[in-house]
């Protein structure tokens, strides 16, 4: 089990959880569009696409992208912090006839969820950028521990000053610093009217 943090850190984690739960209670969050991003489609179906293997989605929401990956031959595990979202994702997968393992829990505490790996692909659509700073090393370590040699992490994130929250946002420099044993191979600006980016990281072949 993870060691308890300070009162301030635990407060940050609780605030993130409440914010996400409020989004799903009040309607569909802006990141949960029901459309698979073209960046993921290009990775899975484009030139040089990898052979389907095992994939882990962090912050899967209502399951759009987990279902997409499963329907393209990937063996998918998907995690989200919000129970309402996970219930919706399971229903979407059942309707689509897609075999996905959905888990409700914290993407920075994968060991507590029994997520063993190894995985060939990790997908993160604005999960990491909302994680409080004190949990980000645990997120990176959890993925690194479960990454097959040469694994890919495709991440979408907001810039540091987009949301009214001092703990949100992500930069290329931060990812290069936190993800030891990975190479940042691509940064592509998003098409949003505010700073966003797609980041591609590759796990060293040595593992």
Image (spheres, helix red, strand yellow):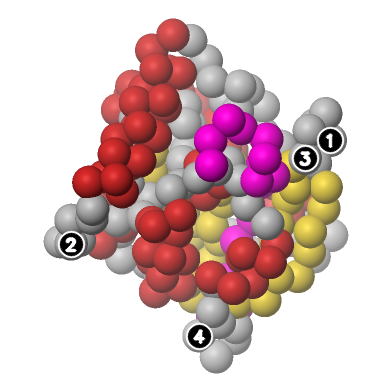
Q: Where is residue 2 in the image (x, y as percent from the top left)?
A: 20, 61
Q: Nearer the viewer, residue 11 or 175?
A: 11
Q: Are marks 2 and 4 in contact (CB under 8 Å)?
A: no
Q: What mark, if any, has residue 191 been given in the picture?
A: 1
Q: Residues under labels 3 and 2: Cα distance?
A: 34 Å
Looking at the image, is mark 1 or mark 2 earlier in the sequence? 2
Q: Residue at x 46, y 41 (%)?
A: 59
Q: Nearer the viewer, residue 84 or 99?
A: 84
User: Magenta span covers which residues?
Assistant: 149-166
Asked whether residue 24 is in view, the answer is yes
Q: Is 79 one of the magenta-colored residues?
A: no
Judge the density around disc 3: few (<14), some (14-19), many (≥20) Cα neighbours within 10 Å. some
Q: Nearer the viewer, residue 172 or 99?
A: 172
Q: Name the residue under label 4.
A: 207
Q: Residues under labels 1 and 2: Cα distance?
A: 39 Å
> Is residue 84 shown left or right of residue 45?
left
Looking at the image, is mark 4 or mark 1 earlier in the sequence? 1
Looking at the image, is mark 3 or mark 2 earlier in the sequence? 2
Q: Mark 3 points at which residue?
A: 195
Judge the density around disc 1: few (<14), some (14-19), many (≥20) Cα neighbours within 10 Å. few
Q: Residue at x 29, y 39 (%)?
A: 11
Mark 4 vs mark 3, foreground winner is 3
Q: What mark, if any, has residue 114 been given in the picture?
A: none
Q: Where is residue 133 in the image (x, y as percent from the top left)?
A: 45, 54
Q: In which quarter of the image is residue 15?
A: top left
Q: Do the residues labelled 4 and 3 touch (CB within 8 Å)?
A: no
84 is higher (above) or lower (below) than 151: above
Q: Name the residue under label 2.
A: 3
């Amino acid at each position: 089990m993870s060691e308890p943090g300070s009162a301030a850190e635990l407060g940050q984690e609780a605030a993130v959880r409440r914010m996400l739960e409020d989004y799903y209670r009040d309607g569909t969050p802006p990141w949960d569009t029901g459309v698979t991003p073209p960046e993921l489609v290009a990775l899975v179906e484009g030139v040089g696409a990898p052979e389907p293997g095992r994939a882990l989605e962090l912050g899967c929401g209502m399951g759009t992208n987990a279902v997409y990956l499963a329907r393209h031959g990937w063996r998918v595990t998907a995690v989200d912090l919000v129970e309402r979202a996970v219930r919706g994702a399971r229903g979407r997968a059942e309707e689509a006839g897609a075999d996905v393992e959905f888990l409700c829990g914290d993407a920075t505490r994968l060991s507590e969820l029994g997520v063993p790996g190894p995985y060939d692909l990790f997908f993160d659509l604005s999960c990491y950028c909302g994680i409080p700073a004190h949990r980000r090393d645990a997120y990176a370590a959890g993925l690194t521990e479960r990454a097959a040699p040469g694994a890919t992490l495709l991440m979408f994130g907001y810039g540091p000053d987009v949301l009214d929250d001092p703990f949100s946002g992500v930069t290329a420099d931060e990812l290069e610093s936190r993800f030891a044993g990975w190479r940042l191979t691509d940064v592509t600006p998003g098409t949003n009217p505010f700073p966003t980016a797609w980041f591609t990281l590759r796990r060293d072949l040595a593992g």
